[in-house]
Amino acid sequence: MADVTGPISTLANSSHEVPDGQTCDDHPDRPAVARIQGETDSFGCEMNDMCAECADKHRAYLRSPEAAEHRKGTCEWCKKPADDLRDRRDYEEGMSGRVYRVCGICVKKENDELAAEERARGDDHDDFDGDYDD
């Protein structure tokens, strides 16, 4: 683990810029070519610095049957079993609030609700495009 952050809005497995001169967490004699966000919660996250070999292994794991098993379980929002769980935040709790394991149906439902809210709001919620009198 190369770095621990404070509260952060991105989620686990997000890619970040590798600091100059950073070495691999597992192979300190090799330069890091990837910085991948690890375990994430409302307090922050771990950043994992990886050499090319470790980054390739990590990417292979994400496509593996073992990773697919990790995506199975009970959705924390609808409480139903799912095989497509992913990390998600409740936007009403803030961009660095608790991380939930949420199914695809709940993600789609929330995205649809947010899109409908945006459409209903129209173009009056910003101060661009000359919407306001000077």
Image (tube, rainbow, N blue to C red):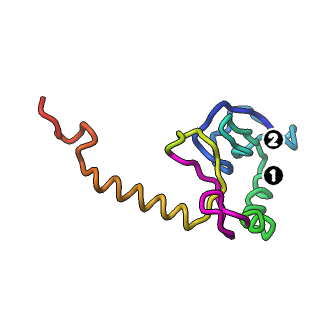
Q: Quadrant of the N terminus?
A: top right
Name which residue type carries label 2: Cys
Percent position of residue 30, x then y: 83, 41
Looking at the rendering, the stretch of residues picked out in magenta corresponds to: 73-91
Question: Would residue 71 appear left or right of 102 to someone viewing this image?
Answer: right
Label 1 Cα neighbours within 10 Å, binned few <14 / some 14-19 / many ≥20: some
Question: Would residue 95 appear left or right of 42 to someone viewing this image?
Answer: left
Name which residue type carries label 1: Cys
Percent position of residue 28, x then y: 86, 38
Residue 76 tag number: none
Residue most extreme to the front: 79
Closer to the camera in the image, 3 or 106 = 106
Closer to the camera in the image, 57 or 79 = 79
| Distance between the alpha carbons at the discs numbered 1 and 2 | 8 Å
Can residue 60 be seen here? The reply is no
Percent position of residue 98, x then y: 63, 43
State if disc 2 and disc 1 touch (CB < 8 Å).
yes
Which residue corresponds to mark 1? 54
Work out whether 129 lies above or below 72. above
Closer to the camera in the image, 46 or 42 = 42
Which residue corresponds to mark 2? 24
